[in-house]
Amino acid sequence: MADEKKEMQKLTFEEVKDHNKAGKCWVVIHDNVYDVTKFLDEHPGGEEVLLEQAGGDATESFEDVGHSSDARDLMKDYHIGELVEEDKRDNVPSKKPNYGDETKKESGSSWLSILLPAAIVVTIAMISYKLFM
């Protein structure tokens, strides 16, 4: 029961910033704080990857790598708390990646980037045709 309270402690971002070395390595991922000090030697990407993010918000880096569900489950072992409300970066409802939405947005903008220049070229061609014929 005492461990559960420790895991749910509220921490400020300033407190996290102080844990930025190999001996005290904390990272924030989706507003949750993880003490990854004991995981440094075990991290498949090497300890340098974690030390680069130590004392800071590693959410973007963590998501960019595309960690497996096993890695996400392993995070529970290192969870020590969460950021206080005013320091949370994800105050908007869950910013956990929704890969389907990103794909749709990108594909929509790529269509626009193809159709818009094509429409401009066709318009210029029609105007040129009418002017010179």
Image (cartoon, grey):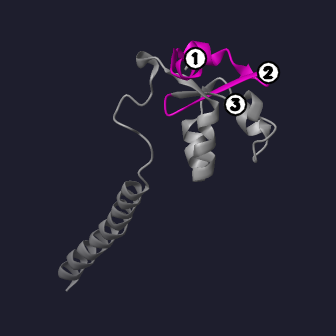
Question: Measuring 22% from the left and 78% from the top, which residue is drawn there?
Answer: 126
Q: Position of residue 11 (x, y in %)?
A: 53, 15
* Helix, strand or loop status at disc 2: loop
| Three-letter code for the amino acid on which mark 3 is drawn | Val
Q: CA distance from mark 1 to mark 3?
A: 20 Å
Compared with 13, 31 (above or below) is below
Q: Quadrant of the N terminus?
A: top right
Residue 6 in magenta? Answer: yes
84, 58: nearer the viewer: 84
| Three-letter code for the amino acid on which mark 1 is drawn | Ala
Point out the tag, 2 or 1, that comes first from the N-terminus. Answer: 1
Residue beneath label 2, please? Answer: 23
| Three-letter code for the amino acid on which mark 2 is drawn | Gly
Total numbered badges shown on the rendered structure: 3
Compared with 96, 32 (above or below) is above
Q: Position of residue 48 (x, y in %)?
A: 78, 37
Residue beneath label 1, please? Answer: 2
* Helix, strand or loop status at disc 1: helix
Comparing labels 1 and 3, the label whose residue is closer to the camera? 1
